[in-house]
Amino acid sequence: MAGELVEFEEKGSSVKATEKVAQILVSEAYLGRVINALAH
């Protein structure tokens, strides 16, 4: 499940894997760069 998107509604709810790869839209300024989850 690592690297996959999961859906949940609230604390204590069950987790469902969506089987989709996480994708983030970025501008051309970020292309070719390595960024972390905080966009640093």
Image (spheres, helix red, strand yellow):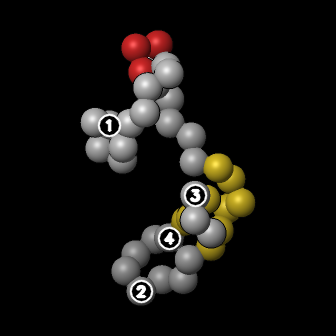
Marks 2/1: CA–CA distance: 28 Å
| Residue in front for this viewpoint, 13 or 32 | 32
Residue closest to the far bottom: 12
Q: CA distance from mark 3 to mark 4?
A: 16 Å
Instruction: Measure how far apart labels 2 and 4 are at the Cα level.
Output: 9 Å
Which element type, helix, strand or loop, lies under badge 4? loop
Few, some or many residues within 10 Å of mark 4 (<14, 14–19, 20+): few
Q: CA distance from mark 4 to mark 1?
A: 23 Å
Above-or-below relation of 26 to 5:
above
Tag of residue 8: 4
Question: Which part of the image, by quadrant, shows the N terminus?
Answer: bottom right
Image position, residue 15 (x, y; %): 56, 77
Q: What label does residue 12 carry, if any?
A: 2
Residue beneath the point at 61% across and 59% down: 4
Q: Mark 3 or mark 4, which has the lower sequence index?
A: 3
Counting labels gives 4
What amino acid type is highlighted by mark number 2? Gly
Front residue of 1/19: it is 1
Is 23 left, or right, of 11 in this rendering?
A: right
The kind of residue on which mark 1 rests is: Ala
The residue carrying mark 1 is: 39
Q: Are discs 4 and 1 less than 8 Å apart at CB?
A: no
Contact check, label 3 and label 1, Cβ < 8 Å: no
**Dot 2: few (<14), some (14–19), or many (≥20) neighbours within 10 Å?**
few
Residue that numbered label 3 is attached to: 3
Residue found 68% across the figure and 53% down from its top: 20
**Element class at badge 3:** loop
